[in-house]
Image (tube, rainbow, N blue to C red):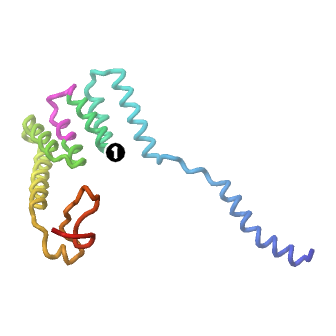
Amino acid sequence: MNKKLIVLIIMLLSPLWLNAQEANTKAPQPFWSDQQTKQAGLEKKYLQAISAEPENKKNYAYLAGLYLTNNKTAKAIDAYQDAITHDADNPKLFAGISIAYLHQSKYDMAKAMADYAIVLDPELKQVKKINEYITVKQEALKAAQSAPLSKNSKQMGHSAVNLNLSAGKPNDAIHGKTK
């Protein structure tokens, strides 16, 4: 074989070989981040503490707060309910469950829990702000639901949709007949 061809082949293949070696020396990426691993460890710790001392009301509150801060709202609501069962006079638990319901857009439940937190401790300024926010949000939703469609919405390609459920298709100016 020609020496020039062999040198050319070696030159072409050496970067590929070096990249393969470099890839083999890199540490594998963990499935969870360090923060996620820490959070999972805390969850396990709190669950074990609850099992060991089911009457210790603080562990329920810690677990609920952990779930809420990690945006696990369904678990947070369950944990807050358990915490409230063990400490029904703690307004902060009602404030926490209010926030969890708020994250799930369950405004009536969020407002009810915030209201009760204020009944338990009228001095909780943050809960009053949460309650004000919920009220404004509920009013905005009611206004949006009752507002008629504007002329601009039709100009943007949007029109009122009347569902014909038997046919499974919308009846509007784009897809079919309108009423």
Q: Amino acid at mark 1?
A: Asn
Q: Compared with residue 140, is residue 150 higher up or lower down, i.e. above or below? A: below
Q: Nearer the viewer, residue 61 or 145?
A: 145
Would residue 72 be found to the left or right of residue 154 on screen?
A: right
Residue 109 at what x, y percent from top left? 15, 42
Q: Nearer the viewer, residue 118 or 74?
A: 74
Q: Which residue is mark 1?
A: 70
Magenta span? 85-97
Q: Nearer the viewer, residue 161 or 142?
A: 161
Q: Quadrant of the C terminus?
A: bottom left
In the picture as drawn, the residue positioned furthest to the front comes out as 166
Is 62 covered by the magenta stretch?
Answer: no
Q: Quadrant of residue 174?
A: bottom left
Residue under the point 30% across and 21% down: 54
In the picture as drawn, the residue positioned furthest to the right comes out as 1
Would residue 19 be found to the left or right of residue 111 on screen?
A: right
Q: Quadrant of residue 10?
A: bottom right
Q: Main secondary structure of the magenta part?
A: helix
Q: Quadrant of the N terminus?
A: bottom right
Q: Compared with residue 123, is residue 145 higher up or lower down, i.e. above or below? A: below
Would residue 145 be found to the left or right of residue 46 on screen?
A: left
Question: Element type at marker 1?
Answer: loop
Residue under the point 24% across and 75% down: 157
Q: Quadrant of residue 46?
A: top left
Residue under the point 18% across and 67% down: 160
Residue 86 at what x, y percent from top left? 22, 25
Q: Residues within 10 Å of mark 1 (few under 14, many from 20)?
A: few
